[in-house]
Image (cartoon, rainbow, N blue to C red):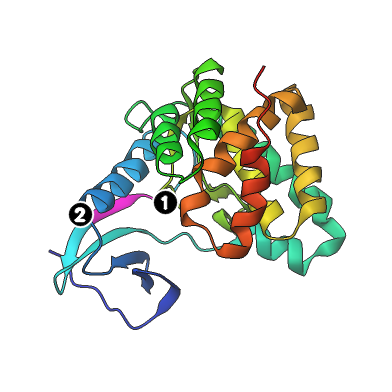
Amino acid sequence: MMEYKLDKILAERPLKTIYLDGNKVIKLMGKEYPASDVLSEALNLAAVGETKLKVPKLIEVTQIDGKWAIVWEYVKGITLAELMKNDPGHFDQYFEQFVDIQLEMHQYTATRLPLLLDKMHRKLFASGLDATVRYELRTRLDSLPRHTKLCHGDYNPSNIIITAEKEAYIIDWSHATQGNASADAAQTYILFYISKKTDIAEKYLSSFCKKSDTARQYVDKWISIVAASQIAKVKPEEKDILLQWANVVEYE
């Protein structure tokens, strides 16, 4: 078992801390973090790593001082979020690149990933929404096409690293599934929206729909489902926004 130095913190999150040790990133979980979730996240990264997408290479899953840890290679660069903020004159160029990378990702499949459909059903059941609303949402979910495209589940500019060689790496695959690309787009739209970036949310969805030749109305059906699936785990101020989408269900 390798030994790692845990003196340089990259990020801190509830129940997890991310460290940098040379050319390796160590994601150290809290003691109460379920082993099944750790292994699932590692499997996601390994499965996506078998495609031709540029992603960090999984190194190992281990334990450090009784805590689970996932270790992967460090990708040196700057995130698209930072580029958009620091170089506003080229914002549109970075933004179109952001959408193009997602569309390329959706061309791949990774059959070892969990099915998005199953994940949505579980989350809707645990959402705490009224039974009638849950029924309508789950009925809509079952009526939508079942695809097996690679979906990131948390696709945003902070999860794209651009290297000095201008290569784009996608990171943080803990929420990855195989499913409908429009569900992944709905997730990204919601992430922008609840971050109070409504103009960017609309700009993103317009670009995604145009580039992928997808009807906005089709993605809208996914927005209500994805929003409802997240209600149980968001901040109170974000919950009100998600409830607006989840409760406006006009199933046809």
**In the image: residue 220, left or right of residue 229:** right
**In the image: residue 235, left or right of residue 86:** left
Please state which of residues 200 and 193 is positioned toward the viewer in this rendering: 193
| Residue 237 horizontal/vertical position (percent) | 63, 64
Residue that mark 2 sits on:
35
Mark 2 vs mark 1, CA separation in Å: 21 Å
Please state which of residues 154 and 1 is positioned toward the viewer in this rendering: 154
Residue that mark 1 sits on:
56
Crowd rating for badge 1 (residues with CA inside 10 Å; few <14, some 14–19, many 20+): many
**In the image: residue 216, left or right of residue 251:** right
The amino acid pointed to by label 1 is Pro
Q: Main secondary structure of the magenta part?
A: strand
In this picture, is 9 found above or below 173?
below
Crowd rating for badge 2 (residues with CA inside 10 Å; few <14, some 14–19, many 20+): some
At mark 1, the secondary structure is: loop
Q: Residue at x 39, y 80 (%)?
A: 8
Q: Residue at x 21, y 69 (%)?
A: 31
The amino acid pointed to by label 2 is Ala
Magenta region, residue range: 56-60
Q: Is residue 14 visible?
A: yes
Q: Is residue 145 visible?
A: no
Q: Quadrant of the C terminus?
A: top right
In this picture, is 128 found above or below 61?
above
Give yes or no for contact between labels 2 and 1 (Cβ–Cβ under 8 Å).
Answer: no
